[in-house]
Structures are given as C-alpha cells and as structure tokens.
Amino acid sequence: MYHLVYTSTATVHFTAAELQQFLVWWRASNSQLGVTGILLYSNEGDIIQVLEGEQPQVEDLFAVIERDLRHRHVLKLAAGPIKQRLFGEWCMSFRLLDSAAFYSLVGYANPDEPLLLPAASGGTDTELLQLLSEFASSHPDALPR
C-alpha cells in the first residue's frame, strides 16, 4: 500500500454544485483504480489531497493531476509506503471548508511559499497523515462523503 499527499491551488473557483458533480466522477474513477483518500478544498480554491492505493495507480493519478490545467502550484508533500489506509472507507472523502478552517491546519501557510506543513520538510509522513486524518474527522462535511 502507498500514499501520496499534495497541495495545489485551483485555477478556477468551483461552486459547491460543480464540486458535487466532479465528486461523482472522481469517486467512480478512484473506485476503478482502487484509490482512496480525502480532498480538502477551501472556498478560496486551496487544495490538500491524500491518495492511497497501489503505487503505480497513485503515481499515475498524481501525474494526471499535475498536468490538469485546473491546478497550479502542485506540490507533493509526502509519498511512500503505508501499512494501511487511513481513508479506506472512501473512494474520496471530501471537506469543503471556509478559509479560516482550512488555514487552521497546523503550520499551513501560503501555497506559494516553499514550506507548507512542518511535517513535509522532515519527511515524517505519519505525522502529516495523522494531522490530516484528525483534521478531517473533526470538521463536518459541507457535501456528502
């Protein structure tokens, strides 16, 4: 099992209705790939996503995301083997957050800055994943999982 965590900024502001439509497609696609994870999206278009699955599928999906013109400032925060999925029950869990909630992630800064999360610089994937897991479970969904 493998995980990858990245951050980016959307080039276009998506409404809740547009995100709902995308989620239907993304979840079906992730299900076919055997990929699970979570997507955190701020009302300003900031994104943090965790992808989990077999390494080739996760890396191929990330390569697609890197080329997707709807993303800019795509930055891989962490990647590597994991013992088990943290978000295994969801093809893609989702949280639509206001900016204050999004920025409450410990250490989160401007996506244009080189250091986004302290865990990313030290290579402590476990801490980063735990932070995202705890954050996700402590904030209500704006859209269904």
Image (tube, grey):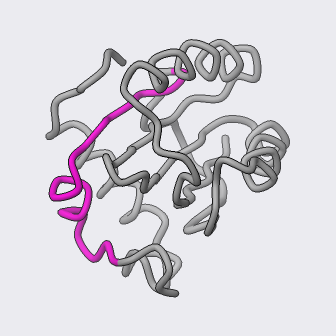
Taking the image as shown, residue 43 lies to the left or right of residue 25, namely: left
Q: Nearer the viewer, residue 68 or 61?
A: 68
Q: Report the magenta residues as a range.
A: 91-109
Compared to 80, does 29 lie above or below? above
Give x and y (percent) for residue 94: 39, 30
Compared to 140, does 132 lie above or below? below
Name the quarter where the N terminus is drawn.
top right
Q: Is residue 100 magenta?
A: yes
For image coordinates 42% across by 56% down, the residue present is 46
Q: Nearer the viewer, residue 3 or 67?
A: 67
Give x and y (percent) for residue 101: 17, 53
Taking the image as shown, residue 45 lies to the left or right of residue 34, namely: left
Q: Nearer the viewer, residue 138 or 101?
A: 101
For image coordinates 43% across by 38% down, the residue present is 86
Taking the image as shown, residue 124 lies to the left or right of residue 73, namely: left
Taking the image as shown, residue 49 lies to the left or right of residue 28, namely: left
Compared to 42, does 52 lie above or below? above
Q: Is residue 7 magenta?
A: no
Give x and y (percent) for residue 52: 60, 39
For image coordinates 57% across by 22% down, the residue present is 22
The answer to which image quadrant residue 31 occupies is top right
